[in-house]
Image (tube, rainbow, N blue to C red):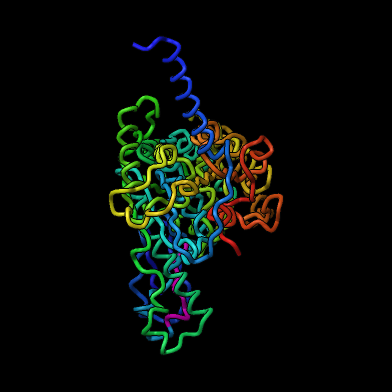
Amino acid sequence: MPRKKPRWGVPVRLIPCGVDWVTDVRVLESPRIHHLSFDLSDIGRSSILDHRPKIVMSIPGQHAKSRKVCFVTVGATASFDSLIKVTLNPHFLEALRTYDYTDLQLQYGKDGQKALEEFRRSKDAMSEGVQDLSISGFDFNKQGLGSEMRAAKGEGNGVEGVVISHAGSGSILDALRIAVPIIVVPNPDLLDNHQEELAEELAIQGYVVHGHLDDLPAAIRRAESLRKTQKPWPPNDTGDNPSDKGLVGVMDDELGFVD
Amino acid sequence: MPPLPYILAITLILLTTATLRLIYILPALHRRRPAPRKRGTPTHLLIVLGSGGHTAEMLSLLAPLNPAHYTYRTYVTGSGDDFSAERAHEFERRLVAKNAEEKEKSEPVSLAHRDGKGTTGISRSDYSIHTVPRARQIHQSLLSSPLSSLRCLCACLRLLYWHPNGYPDLILTNGPATSLILILAATILRYFAFLPVVGPAAQSARGRTVSGTMRVVYVESWARVKRPSLSGRIIVWCGLCDRMLVQWKGLQDRGWGEYKGVLVR
């Protein structure tokens, strides 16, 4: 059984697999990977090469963790650096670790990159707890945030995480549709307070957690209870008259369609 | 030089006429039932798309639209908003695909049907996307941009007047700035009862009237819980829309629009 030393000096134990030609195991330099093993069922088959084996590295003494993503989005139009800064705060990262999060992904908008870079240079990033949290970021994706939302949902080989959103209706709806817990943090710098009202109302109805910049760690805890009680979307309420057909009904009316 | 009383009288008569005409055409002051029509007869729906959030929500609202009933769709976007235009194209492609699928399900395809017109479904020319100059830049107030608003208004008038399919039967909007201007343009055309006598729609417009066309349905954004957006308030205050739909019960309770449940899906 080959033994290799990864960069951070922890010996890697390969899970015995009885196939000794699996010698060329490279340990990736990213701290993202906690586990390295081969999917044995695939090795038995001849199609191993085109089947891309699942690589999981196991570090002795460390608990096996599956991926759990916290996805933070600030939208495209206005910047919301204070949210990015709060999510990089040691207290918040500590809360993430408490609830077994492995990934923190930031969609930081036009000029949020600075905050992330500052954090990477700071001594917080070097502390032990932060090391096993994989933190990444990007400015914006014009194609939408579907893949990040699904990663937060835990599609693939992860468990369900959480989405933290500036109260943009698009991101809230996206999260509600795929039923991933969402924390809504309205931007207090914006003059119009309709986002605050939206977050409040949705929280009252039990769809989201209404978060504030100064209590985000608590919001992470509340998101765990929301996970169990979140109501399905869309709501079944169709107004006063249940036979109404929503927008299409009104449009039909206005066009004078006779049924 | 006629004496002053005559001038006053004439002015008064003109003003009264103008006001009466305004009362007559403003949907909020004079509601009329639309003329009944059969499903499947040609209809023209105009959809105003705004930037980002507006567009996404509008297309989500339109998801249950049946293209067999809404036979022609015109999308209007502000200039420089390629994103919205792209999304509209994408939406139309999905609409065609969904429609074809439903057709296949409802009527088993026979061979004779295959080569006929039956399975071609909705063709490409059933919609068009138009661009008008933006009424205002992002974060610019509508009032501080009279010149660009005027340019936008001219473009909207031209768009409505020269549209090959004639005036739209229905204008659907969720309140981007461009839509205010477009609704204003529609109101002007209805006020003066301009029929397209020149231009591509002149032929089809013969013998029809302006009244009854260009009805306005305004859908307030789902993000508005207690108070409509500025566009919504302006449209209601000026009495420009035939129907206003809101997506929160609280708004209806406060006297804004009709609540028919959450419309975004």
Which residue does the image show at 50% across and 55% down from the upper left? Answer: B60
Residue B264 visible: no
Residue in front for this viewpoint, B21 or B31: B21
Residue B208 in picture, x, y percent from top left: 43, 53
Residue B193 in picture, x, y percent from top left: 42, 41
Which residue does the image show at 33% across and 64% down from the upper left? Answer: B125
Residue A166 in picture, x, y percent from top left: 50, 40
Which residue does the image show at 35% across and 50% down from the upper left? Answer: B83
Residue in front for this viewpoint, B40 or B206: B206
Instruction: Please say if B78 is above or below B123.
Output: above
Quadrant of image for the N terminus of chain A: bottom left
Residue in front for this viewpoint, A231 or A135: A231
Which residue does the image show at 39% across and 25% down from the upper left? Answer: B143
Please report the bounds of the magenta region as a residue range: A35-43
Quadrant of image for the C terminus of chain A: bottom right
- In the rendered structure, the answer to whether residue B72 lies left or right of residue A178 reads left
Q: Is residue A63 shown in magenta?
A: no
Residue A151 visible: yes
